[in-house]
Amino acid sequence: MSRDHILHKIRTALGRSAGQPPAEAPPVRLRVPEADLATRIEAFLSSVSRLGGKAYRARSPGEVRDYAARLLDGRRAVASNAAVLQDCGITCLPGVECGFADRSALQAACAQAELGITGADYALADTGTVVLLASAAEARMISLLPPVHLAVVPKECILTGLDELFTLLPRPSELTSSAVLITGPSRTADIEQILVRGVHGPGEIHVVVW
Amino acid sequence: MARRVSLFATCLVDQLFPSVGLAVAEVLERLGWTVEFPEGQTCCGQPAFNSGYWDEARQVARHCLQVFREAEYVVVPSGSCAAMVSRHYRELFHKEPEVLAEAEALAGRVWEFSRFLLEVARVEDVGARYDGVVTYHDGCHALRELGIREGPRRLLAHVRGLVLKEMDIAEECCGFGGTFSVKFPEISGAMARTKIASILRTGADTVVSTDSSCLMQLRGALLRAGACVRTLHLAEVLAFR
Amino acid sequence: MIRIPHERFERVLAEGALQEAIYTATGRLMEKRREAVAPEVLPDYQELRAQARRIKEHTLENLDFYLEQFESQVLARGGRVIWCRDGGEVVDFLTALAREKNARLIVKSKSMTTEEIHLNEQLEERELEPVETDLGEYILQLAGERPYHIVAPALHKTRYDVAEVFSRTLGVEREEVPERQTRIARATLREKFLAADIGLTGANFLVADSGAVVLVENEGNARLTTTIPRIHVAVAGIEKVIPRAQDLAVFLKLLGRSATGQPLTVYTSVLAGPRREGEPDGPEEFYVVLLDNGRTRVLADREKRESLFCIRCGACLNHCPVYRKIGGHNYPWVYSGPIGAILTPQYFGTGHEPWLPFASSLCGACGEVCPVKIDIPKMLLLLRREIAKAAVREGKARWERAAFRLWAWLMARPKLYEFAGMAASALAPEGSQGWLRALPGFLNVGPLRAWLRERDLPAPAPRSLRQRWRVRPRVERT
């Protein structure tokens, strides 16, 4: 009822008829710069630091695990089912829970955990962004509920920026119900423009590239 | 080459600040141009246009088109009035093809004073001398409708004895805005005071701009604030030697 | 005569601390934007703006097509689309949904569209409990105020105001440090998130080819709103649709930079449908409410259609010297600043608060920074024309029109114009070096009086330029 009413008003306003195909859309504008892997890694790490995140370049899976262990320091963590976390041995660290299949158990664990550990589907070098696509491997909550987020980023996932991401993933929603771009720690400046980190999401973000 | 220009002084300069028009003529004549003052000229029509009275604005605009029909170069010591003629006449007459053609033609022949010096007369150094510390106020229409930003500063840079000190908010509006200044005097006045504070922070003894309307607002507010800063149109500074 | 609320302006102009707060906060946002779009960091800024405008133009010109495409994509991903003509229909839908799902607590992330229809008040009347979760919006909800700014809703609140609001409404100890105030909000709202049945958001973009709702934020509250509750409802204006997910590359680069100077905001969520097979979490149900509420009327006006391009970055507010003086609450609607000045009369009719499009010096700063290149000054001029026409038609502007008619008549008659100038000059009192501090009573009226309230007035020149020109010695040619 309202649907037809609104569409009718739109068509009247535009002088269009139902089912009329659209005019040709302006061509998509995506410009992907050339940058080799080393440059992308370097840029990504410095972008993350600039945002107030902690960036670390690991040389081996063991270094990734050690970083996670130091960060844990006896606290509780929830890890996603990303393969990279298993490969690095993070899921076996004491205090790390993972492999949740049940939603409410996952939520309860995330609400209690001090640390959420995820992989990354992509990362954007120019903005220091970690891209997470919700899937069986990546739950949405792990990068969101705990006050600290650790993302382990396989180096080949690092893209130059948004344009490359949307070149590779023209329609992310075909793959996932939720594609999230995380650029730095949760923040606000709502009170007197004073920057405060960790409003609702993690106030601390650690990114380990290997 | 016909080195002849018509001066469109604007009503404000004609009635309130004639020295600006004389200064424009002096500078151009020194550079070898013959300056004419078509006696039929009055106003560009902007006050009515900006107030929503487009019929009345059209009446005045038509008159203006007719006055400058024959002129090869029309020089205007105001970015705002120049933009009115070169940009907004099109809007006023977009339903009257004949007048529109005339408006388009005039648009190509209208020059804001500083732009005329730089792009037609092709001079940066007019041989002026002014001993003082000057700060430059960007008139909004010169800046945003005509894209005039560096030009006046380049001209000032060549004035002997002149020291240019930039404001921190040179591009912020002075609060004049035509009828806005009297419809919303409290807001307009507050904007002027903000601008004046910035002028005073520079320590300049003179404020210069391309538009007498901004300078009227600034001068009026400076006097009211008891501040001892002179206001001069760019042409007046360039006429000094 | 159009009534202008001078008393309100004067009141806010007299509040020194507030003036300082608005000017500093907007000034900082201006500075951050300037740095973020500087040619050194974003060389193709102007091309991006041009592309963004082209896309918006194209989408609106084919809006029915893209909305239907969006709808079918949402359906294909297991979501539902609800079309609402106005706020009432949104409330009806939400109330019915809440009843059906036995839901009461609704967590909300910041949404100007729901502000526009005063959704919170209406939901409360229906015994539902909407809770704002964006820190600024939360403070305002507790204080019972509407947003002061599109992007920074609590721009006018000091930490001391927040301390007062929190201690009064939440029963916590008075706390004046923003960091600790934020902790209080986090803890209180976290409980709400975990208990909420429905998560309500706006949408920064709707993506037609994906059926996606895109949300842009810094705090994480929009993510929580769309992750924890079983039901996600997004309320979006119909103009929010863009054709392709790939167009996001353009809009995301412009939005954060224009709003707060961030190349990207902290979280950008591209959400399409309820959680899918195998995904561990996310909502079970996904609804998108497409709201008209006057937008189709704006769409029908070819000249001013571009007002609907707005992506709500707030840059025009920050750069507006008028907004920076009178603040957000002196604008009649939730959309303040230049964009509010052009949207309000188009949604409510030009008879509603007709002073609004006139409250601008036409400085053009808004149009200069608009990321989708809305020609706001031109929209203001067009609205002024409509308002003046209506005022004349309704006999409300007799004097003003008579004055402009006389003026136009005079301006087309140079001799009379010159004579009038001479008369004014003869009539004017002598000033000090040509400037007047005051005028005798019979002259101290109307515009002259308004001018003199704030500034000294230049006296008419004793002889006009044309008179001096006739007797002027010519400079020798060099």
Image (spheres, coloured by chain):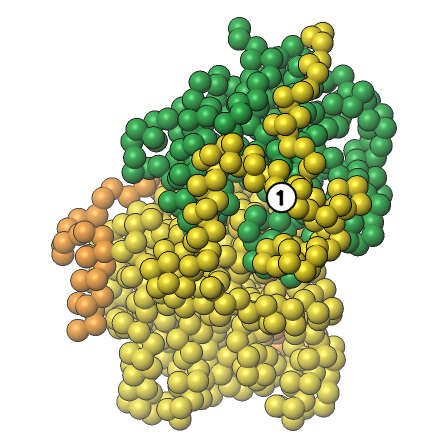
Chain colours: A orange, B green, C yellow
Question: Circle 1 marks a residue in which chain?
Answer: C
Label 1's element?
Answer: helix
Q: Is residue A28 above or below residue C83?
A: above
Q: Please give left or right for residue A55 compared with residue A158 in the image.
A: right
Residue A196 horizontal/vertical position (percent): 67, 69
User: Can residue C282 be seen in this snapshot?
Assistant: no
Task: Please tell me which residue is depicted at 35% across the width and 37% down the height of the picture.
Answer: B93
- Taking C137 as reference, is C45 above or below it? above
Identify which residue is drawn at 45% across, 67% down.
C353
Q: Residue placed at 54% from the left, 87% from the top?
A: C191
- The answer to whether C274 is drawn above or below residue A162 in the figure is below
Residue found 76% across the figure and 16% down from its top: B127
Disc 1 target residue:
C424
Q: Nearer the viewer, residue A40 or A31?
A: A31
Q: Tell me if residue A65 comes above or below residue C129 in the rendering.
A: above
Residue A34 in the image: state x and y as whole percent.
Answer: 50, 35
Q: Is residue A9 visible?
A: yes
Amino acid type indicated by mark 1:
Ala
In the foreground, C201 or A59:
C201
How many labels sit on residues?
1
Label 1 crowd bin: few (<14), some (14–19), many (20+), radius 10 Å = some
Measured as percent of width and height from the top left, residue C336 is found at 51, 64
Quadrant including the N terminus of chain A: bottom left
Residue C311 pos. (x, y %) = 44, 57
In the picture, measured across the screen, residue C275 lies left or right of residue A51, that is left
- Please identify the quarter of the rendering in which residue A60 is found: bottom right
Q: For residue C141, what is the image quadrant?
A: bottom right
Q: Nearer the viewer, residue B165 or C228?
A: B165
